[in-house]
Image: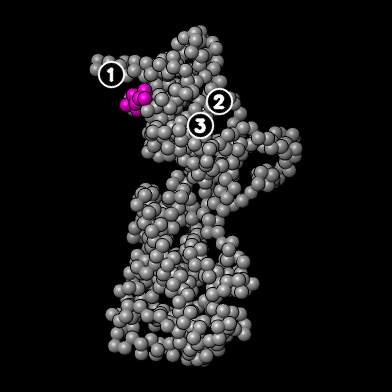
């Protein structure tokens, strides 16, 4: 049903008069008309919804259906105190407040409604940021967020809670974006500006939003996550109840079959009239993370061959080959392509799998009591990207991340020509006579210094096996594999894993002293780089030695722990002299 200007004006006046009559002597604060049914299926009557806020209203909440000017109108009258608590903290599970997340017309109290809408939008924005912080604890620091994310995140989450909202949104979409997106974004942009000005929670950089470190740390507390999860239950209950109950009342006013066709209770009957794009809205396409080739959307999807074509758009890559090169807990591929003048390009691709079931069980047993591993593929991919960017910005040598597909859990990175540090250790073991002043030993000392610098930034890598260190052809040292990295993690684990895993490559007989030399050299590099003696000291604890004893022979383990003890004593002597 459509209205001309005079009919709509008359209808609005009837609504205002009815609200004042129902409120009696109680002051009417605001009246809003939800503008989401204006373009319904032709030849079927549409439904309008009205929310009225009344001061000191008794009862606190009243919902009923009226037939005004040939139009069904669902009217909800709510006490001002209840309404403002629903805005501020979801007192009714946002059953009333969430109506302001959809387009509406103010019939009375426009300034009041907009002020409450801003309060609601600020709270919902903070909730969205808190959820991102918990889902992507490392990556959140590097995210560049467009305001559209908050708009669609709010709408999409409410549609998941109450799927019948898809019907209401059908006529609001052009493709999978809102027809009047600019208008819908105004209140979100105003709310974001207030958050930036008043709370310093966010910062505008160009057209993007960046979240402050202080708020991220606050958001990652388990209590915050639990609070947000608890909110979902009443939100689901109340939204569903107040979304359907007034429509059930309307059955008494219309033929039941007509009601089913017009009032959304049978989603199958309405399915042909629902815009399928309602189900393809992905708010994460408005979140971007940096790579060496530019920012990439969190929702971007790409396969291996598509990426190769994208990476060399003007070079027409030929003879593209994709080879699996290993990986137990992840899939790892090497892409080779010939470009101009038969120049070969190499790219490493890592697919992050979820660790579950039997594959995860041995890892749990192995590290029980010493370290907890991140098992989610999504979370490990986020750690890889965030840590790589963190280290790159601070001058560490890391492979460039060329592209990321978060939906497919793929990361494409630069291939570093060189050899991993485990080969250097094996050479030292095979030729102990040349260990002193050897380049291999110099590399081990440099790695110790790099770990100390990492720990100075409170960054721990979590997987510090020597093969995750690459010595490039130009003698630069590159660090790899950051999927277990974290800030404020266990620094001693990094030390223990490197030393004891290095011992894994050594032959226990004959005892040529290489284990002691490697351990002593690494520790000197770590301490000279500013590392703490106590971090080294704890590496000989049974908490760590029992974990790595299944990889390294007992004589080597003993040589390493004895060297740690000796270094301790020598350091104390030097300090006391």
Between 512 and 293, the one nearer to me in the picture:
512
Please, what is the dominant secondary structure of the magenta stretch?
A: helix
Determine the secondary structure under disc 1.
helix
Residue on which the image places disc 3: 479
Q: Residue at x 39, y 61 (%)?
A: 231
**Is residue 538 positioned above or below 243 on the image?**
above
Determine the secondary structure under disc 3.
strand
Q: Residue 576's x, y, as percent?
A: 24, 17
Residue on which the image places disc 2: 420
**Is residue 174 positioned above or below 387 on the image?**
below
Magenta range is: 534-542
Earlier along the polypeptide chain: callout 3 or callout 1? 3
Q: Residue at x 52, y 19 (%)?
A: 505
Quarter of image, res 112: bottom left
Give the spatial CA distance, label 2 vs label 1: 34 Å
**Is residue 506 positioned above or below 12 on the image?**
above
Q: Quadrant of the C terminus?
A: top left
Q: Residue 136's x, y, as percent?
A: 46, 48
Visible in this render: residue 65? yes
Asked if the residues shown at circle 2 and circle 1 are in contact, with their CB atoms under 8 angstroms apart, the answer is: no
Q: Residue at x 42, y 83 (%)?
A: 64
Give the spatial CA distance, label 3 vs label 1: 31 Å
215 is within the stretch colored magenta? no
Give the spatial CA distance, label 2 vs label 3: 10 Å
Earlier along the polypeptide chain: callout 2 or callout 1? 2
Left or right side of 300 for 318:
right
Q: Residue at x 28, y 80 (%)?
A: 56
Left or right side of 62 for 439:
right
Q: Residues within 10 Å of mark 2 (few under 14, many from 20)?
A: many
Earlier along the polypeptide chain: callout 2 or callout 3? 2
Residue on which the image places disc 1: 572
């Amino acid at each position: 049903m459509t209205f001309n200007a005079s009919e709509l004006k008359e209808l609005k006046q009837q609504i205002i008069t009815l609200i004042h009559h129902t409120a009696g002597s109680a002051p009417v604060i605001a009246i809003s008309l939800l503008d989401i049914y204006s373009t319904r299926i032709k030849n079927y009557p549409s439904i309008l919804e009205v929310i009225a806020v009344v001061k000191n209203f008794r009862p606190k909440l009243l919902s009923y259906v009226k037939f005004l000017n040939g139009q069904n109108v669902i009217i909800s009258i709510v006490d001002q105190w209840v309404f403002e608590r629903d805005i501020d903290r979801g007192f009714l599970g946002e059953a009333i407040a969430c109506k302001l997340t959809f387009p509406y017309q103010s019939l009375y109290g426009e300034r009041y409604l907009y002020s409450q809408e801003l309060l609601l939008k600020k709270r919902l924005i903070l909730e969205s940021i808190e959820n991102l912080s918990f889902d992507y604890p490392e990556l959140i620091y590097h995210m560049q967020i467009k305001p559209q994310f908050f708009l669609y995140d709010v709408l999409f989450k409410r549609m998941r809670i109450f799927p019948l909202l898809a019907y209401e949104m059908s006529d609001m979409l052009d493709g999978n974006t809102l027809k009047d997106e600019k208008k819908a974004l105004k209140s979100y942009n105003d709310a974001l500006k207030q958050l930036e000005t008043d709370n310093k929670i966010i910062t505008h950089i160009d057209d993007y939003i960046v979240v402050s470190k202080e708020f991220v740390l606050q958001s990652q507390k388990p209590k915050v996550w639990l609070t947000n999860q608890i909110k979902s239950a009443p939100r689901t209950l109340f939204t569903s109840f107040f979304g359907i109950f007034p429509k059930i009342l309307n059955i008494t006013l219309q033929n039941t079959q007509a009601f089913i066709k017009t009032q959304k209770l049978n989603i199958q009957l309405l399915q042909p009239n629902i815009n399928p794009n309602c189900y393809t809205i992905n708010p994460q396409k408005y979140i971007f993370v940096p790579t060496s080739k530019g920012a990439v959307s969190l929702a971007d999807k790409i396969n291996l061959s598509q990426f190769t074509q994208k990476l060399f758009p003007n070079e027409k890559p030929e003879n593209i080959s994709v080879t699996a090169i290993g990986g137990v807990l992840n899939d790892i591929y090497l892409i080779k392509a010939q470009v101009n003048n038969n120049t070969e390009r190499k790219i490493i691709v890592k697919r992050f799998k979820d660790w579950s079931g039997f594959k995860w069980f041995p890892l749990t047993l192995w590290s029980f009591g010493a370290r907890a591993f991140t098992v989610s593929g999504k979370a490990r991919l986020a750690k890889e990207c965030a840590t790589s960017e963190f280290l790159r910005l601070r001058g560490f040598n890391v492979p460039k991340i060329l592209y990321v597909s978060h939906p497919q859990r793929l990361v494409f990175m630069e291939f570093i020509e060189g050899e991993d540090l485990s080969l250097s250790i094996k050479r030292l073991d095979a030729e102990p006579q040349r260990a002193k002043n050897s380049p291999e030993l110099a590399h081990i000392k440099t790695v110790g210094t790099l770990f100390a610098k990492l720990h100075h930034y409170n960054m721990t890598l979590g997987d510090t096996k020597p093969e995750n260190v690459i010595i490039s052809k130009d003698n630069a040292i590159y660090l790899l594999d950051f999927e277990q990295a974290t800030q404020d993690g266990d620094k001693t684990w990094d030390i223990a894993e490197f030393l004891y895993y290095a011992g894994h490559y050594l032959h226990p007989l004959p005892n040529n002293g290489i284990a002691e030399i490697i351990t002593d050299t690494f520790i000197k590099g770590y301490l000279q780089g500013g590392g703490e003696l106590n971090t080294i000291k704890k590496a000989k604890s049974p908490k760590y030695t029992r974990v790595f004893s299944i990889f390294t022979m007992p004589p080597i383990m003993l040589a390493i722990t004895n060297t740690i003890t000796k270094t301790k004593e020598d350091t104390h002597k030097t300090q006391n002299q």
